[in-house]
Structures are given as C-alpha cells and as structure tokens.
Amino acid sequence: MSRVEHAGASLYYESYGNPDDPALVFAHGAGGNAASWWQQVPFFLDRGLRVVVFDHRGFARSACADEDLEVTHFPADLLAILDAEGIERTALVCQSMGGWTGLPAAIAHPERIRCLVLCGTPGGLWTDVVRDSFSKIAERVQGMGGIVGPGGAALADDYPSREPRMAFLYEQIANMNDVPPALLASMSAAKTEPAALENFGTPTLVLSGDKDVLFPPDVLENVANTIPGALLERFDGAGHSTYFEQPDRFNAVVAAFIDKY
C-alpha cells in the first residue's frame, strides 16, 4: 500500500507482482475503489503481470479537498502513480467513471498506454449519441434506488436476486466512498470531442453489458465505432459492472486482448 501526492490529492494505490513484469492498471468507477478489483488482481498476477489498483481522488483512501475534486485531474493522477512506480508503459482497464482517466491519458500520452479497455464507459468521448444518452441517465435510473445500493443501476436489474451476497459486497465496497455529487456532475463537463481522436492509435477494446442502463449497448457501440480501430465485446445478461457480475468471462476477454500488445 503506497501513496503519491499530486495536485492537492493524496492518492492511495496498491502495486502487486514483480516490478520487471508487464504492467496492468485498473481504474475504478464511481461505485468503486481499489477494492473493486478483488476478482481481477489474483487472476492477472497468476498470468505474470504486475498489477496496480488505486482509489481515484476523493474516493475511499485518496484524500482530496473539495476544491481539488475534479475529474479533469484523473489522467494526470494516473501518470503520477505510474511515475512513482517507475512504470513507463502499461495496459489500462477502466470501468465507467474510470474511462475519464483512461481515454484522455491515452490521447495525451500514447507512449505510456500500450492498450486500453473501456468497460461500460464512453471515457468522456462526447458524440451526439453519448450527449443525448447522458442527458437522460437520471430519467433511466429513476425508481431504481440510485446508482449504487439495492436495486441500483450499477448492476443488472436481476443480479441482486440471483447473487444476493455478491450484490451486498458490491454495496459495501461502494460505501467506502463519500463522494460529493458535484464530482459526478463534472463528468459531463470533461468532454473529449471526436476530433481529438484524429491521430489516435492506442489499441482499444470496449466492453458492453446488454442490461446496462447507465451506458446502454447502443451508446457503447457508437463509442467503439468512433474510436479508430476499437473492438466491441458484448456481455449478455450483464449490467453496468461486467467485471463484477461476470468476472470469469471478463478476465478471459481482457487477458486475450492485452496479450496481443
């Protein structure tokens, strides 16, 4: 367990494995933190990767003053962690809000990101389809118990009844956070216009759950079609959190992708 101080935040992170092994970093979503990846870390360690997980600023153990709590800091926070660990280049897996870390970082510093996986996220990419869908998120989750919690939109609607213990664990991990609503609201202001992808060459995989009500399949298909060369993988029966709901398939799909690069 380590920390790095950056731009008003004390960033908590964990690094596992041999420092000489290829690196893989996971960036969590708004319902998570470093603990979210408990089903991924052992799997990828066994595959000979160095694995890094962290709490975004303002989440769980990464302390940050309210005035410094902006998603626009996320990409530079990631680079600060990479620098602290001496990681020159990494594969990067981003869930939901974590996409606002990954895609901008890959655009600004392609030499640091060897491949990118966007899970249930447009990564801040602001196409007409994403803009329209983003404006209707509140409408879609109305009556669902919010984003996280029993019946929340972060999981498939039938997941809590199928996997009540796992749904309870998801909620407990999310409860480690105390995030002001203003942070999530700032996501819509941190836009990546399609023109920024003109010279984009980072190999990218987009993962989509067919029951995701936050970023539905048609939105993520549009994202995959907009990012040059991006691939799209659909998860039948999964909601917004494919990494948590279907970890075995998620791990296999991600492993097959990053092994190519």
Image (cartoon, rainbow, N blue to C red):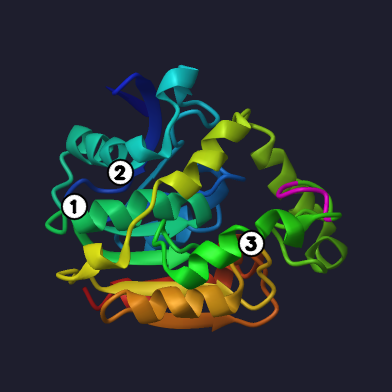
Residue behind mark 3: 214
Q: Left or right: 5 with respect to 242? A: left
Decide if residue 93 is on the left or right side of residue 120.
left
Q: Secondary structure under badge 1? A: helix
Magenta-drawn segment: 144-148
Looking at the picture, how far across and down is residue 10, in whole percent? 38, 21
Could you give the CA–CA distance between mark 1 and mark 2, rounded to whole angstroms? 9 Å
Secondary element type, mark 2: helix
Element marked by disc 3: loop
- x, y (%) of residue 72? 35, 39
Q: Does 80 sit above or below residue 53? A: above
Compared to residue 25, the image places residue 155 above or below, namely below
* Labels 1 & 2 near each other (Cβ < 8 A): yes
Name the residue located 21 percent from the left edge and 73 percent from the top edge.
261
Residue 163 x/y as whole percent: 80, 63
Q: Using a 10 Å C-alpha cutoff, classify the residue at mark 1 as few (fewer than 14 neighbours), some (14 to 19) or many (20 or more).
A: some
User: Which one is nearer the viewer's eye here, 117 or 220?
Assistant: 220
Report how far apart the C-alphas of labels 3 and 2 lie in the structure. 22 Å
Task: Name the residue located 74 percent from the left edge and 62 percent from the top edge.
Answer: 140
Going from N to C along the chain, the mark reached first, 3 or 2, is 2
Residue holding disc 1: 108
Give the labeled residue for mark 2: 75
Amino acid type at image mark 2: Pro
Looking at the rendered structure, the kind of residue marked 3 is Leu
Q: Quadrant of residue 48?
A: bottom left
Does 121 lie within the magenta span?
A: no
